[in-house]
Image (spheres, rainbow, N blue to C red):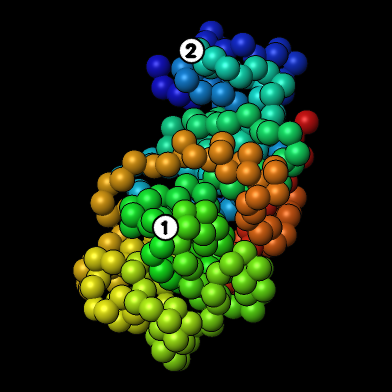
Amino acid sequence: MNNWDTSSKDVKNPASNPVTMRTVRFRDYGEPADVLRLEEVAIPVPGPGRIRVRVCACGLNPVDWVMCRGHFASQLPLPRGIGLDVSGIVDAVGEGVTGVAIGDSVLGAADFIGGSSAGASDRAIMYYWFRMPAGLDFVQAAALPMAVETAYRGIDTLGVRSGQTVLVHGAGTTVGFAAVQIALMRGARVVATAGATYAGQLRAMGAMVTSYGDGMVDRVIELAEQPVDLVLDTAPISGAIKDLIQIVNGNPQRVLTVSDFAGAAELGVRASYGEEPSLRYDVVGHFAQLTAEGKFTIPVAQTFSLDDWRTALEISQSGRAQGKLILLPTAD
């Protein structure tokens, strides 16, 4: 049985649930604005090891638009939904699931591989989840999963440790913002490149901050006042890989990118998805607790109704989101 079985025999599922829902998904590959549609579909039923939630908040990520253009096409048959980061209230539990019950508030990852809809929906199947700690709201929760997982995995893969000097390039992105905090928690000295929007917050955390663009290499070296040991590149693709290699004295293996995979292949830089590392969703619950305690944060730029998803798409693709964009489905 697959994880999106439409029968109900595996599910403790209230009979009062509606049978259809709204979801944003695509049936062909192409530019997101051209192929994405808000559709009415049957509500999926969770198979073994899965739960279903009424989606309260769904975080959007650049990978959503990459998937629309055909990335992972061999793994993801059409139609396909968008929205990986989800927080919501459990309303159905699949066979074999323990430790969570209908009515619990959870955050985690939508099962975008196992079915034809994902988190940008009134209901979503989840394959990884944590109970939400007290003090964490749904919007904050939906901002966490992918940013935390990607940043933590990058910092971990680089082997960042106490006493090292680390450059986080693109610290104004949600992944970069998370990575700065994680590196500081490990006792590293952090230099961050970022625009004006979050420079003040990054400095308040303890990072040394400079801007992008011409002269970045010299500015970073001057700020660091000692050799930079490692670089985590979390910025949108900008052709900066050569500069980042120069910052670590010409050693491309001391640079890891989460975005510029073509540049990594050309110049010998490490890529976050090129070394087949295990995904680190296991740490999301810990960072959810830290967020609830005010010890960690991912900036949220704006929230949108599900009906207003096109506005969120336009802002995301403009490169001026300045934080996480969150959809708020009005699940009944």
User: Compared to 309, does 129 lie above or below?
Assistant: above
Badge 1 marks a residue whose secondary structure is loop
In the picture, measured across the screen, residue 6 lies left or right of residue 326, that is left
User: Compared to 34, does 53 lie above or below?
Assistant: above
User: Which residue is most to the top?
Assistant: 9
Q: Which mark is residue 162?
A: 1
* Quadrant showing the N terminus: top left
Cβ atoms under marks 1 and 2 closer than 8 Å: no
Residue at image coords 66%, 68%: 204
Residue at image coords 39%, 64%: 164
* Quadrant showing the C terminus: top right
Occupied quadrant, residue 209: bottom right
Residue 124 on image: x %, y %: 59, 33
In the picture, measured across the screen, residue 188 lies left or right of residue 307, that is left
Foreground: 188 or 78? 188
User: Compared to 224, does 160 lie above or below?
Assistant: above
Foreground: 57 or 258? 258
Occupied quadrant, residue 122: top right
Between disc 1 and disc 2, the foreground one is: 1
Residue 167 on image: x %, y %: 43, 70
Residue at image coords 51%, 76%: 193
Residue 292 on image: x %, y %: 70, 42
User: For mark 2, what is the residue?
Assistant: 96
Indicate the amino acid at tag 1.
Answer: Ser
